[in-house]
Amino acid sequence: MLFILSPAKNLNEKDPAPVSEYTLPDLLDQAEKLMEEVRLLSPQQLAELMHVSDKIALLNAERNAVWHTPFTPENAKQAVYMFNGDVYEGLDAPSLNQQAVNYLQTHVRLLSGLYGLLRPLDLMQPYRLEMGTAFANARGKNLYEFWDNRITDLLNKTLADLGDNTLINLASQEYFKAVRPNKLNARLITPVFKDEKNGKYKIISFYAKRARGLMVRYAAEHNISEAEQLKDFDYEGYVFNDAASNENEWVFLRQEQSK
């Protein structure tokens, strides 16, 4: 069983990683090719392309200018400790023990606009390049065309190495579009998290993102090996609802808390 997550826009560059072990991204050579093109963009071009403020555009132009290989623990940081958004707050990797971290490294992959596909302990240097960015490059008009089948091929290889054929999709739609389901040698399961509000259940973005991280944490802490075991996921009040689910979409509901 393999989980996929989206990355985060916010990065924690300040705090050191709590572990010393690391790996290098499998698609780092592709990231180098992509960065050669991205770093040619001026701050103004980055602001227009990514629809960000001048301040954020300047920060990322500076990041692009100093981005370089080889990656070392001195100039890069393990991805699962670098990403700092809602998903990663739910996962809270710094508080996991070594056995759980080992589980993450084996069973979790992080999609990335720049790096393609990362293991949790893969070193990365700071960047911002969302998968949905319409960045025209040598391979096509956007990043989906740049990555083409490369991410899917690596997922298939990873699943084969695991001896498993189940992929748990905890990525956003923007990032999952980088995967080619028709070329995936796997059963695909997409958990959906809904919260009750005013008597109705709906997907609330902040809570749903956090729940994705919580589910990965649950799997790591319980050393989950079979997808069916995920139906017992109950962190922060979520409960699997069989009636609302189907074979490929598993729905977890959380009741509104009384005030």
Image (tube, helix red, strand yellow):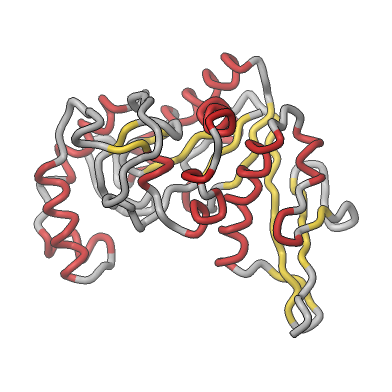
Q: Residue at x 55, y 49 (%)?
A: 91
> In the rendered image of this protein, does residue 115 appear above or below residue 249?
above
Residue 17, quarter of the rendered image: top left
Q: Residue at x 50, y 34 (%)?
A: 109
**Residue 166 appears at what percent x and percent y?**
68, 29
Viewer-closest of 252 and 48: 252
Which quadrant does the C terminus fall into?
bottom right
Name the side, left or right, on which 68 lies relative to 7. Answer: left
Which quadrant does the N terminus fall into?
top right
Residue 146, quarter of the rendered image: top left
Please, which residue is most extreme toward the right here? 243
**Residue 201 appears at what percent x and percent y?**
76, 71
**Residue 92 appears at what percent x and percent y?**
52, 49
Q: Is residue 183 visible?
A: no
> In the rendered image of this protein, does residue 85 appear above or below residue 70?
below
> In the rendered image of this protein, does residue 9 appear above or below residue 248?
below
Q: Is residue 250 visible?
A: yes
Q: How many marks?
A: 0
Q: Residue at x 25, y 31 (%)?
A: 73
**Residue 76 appears at what percent x and percent y?**
25, 36
Name the side, left or right, on which 130 lies relative to 199. Answer: left
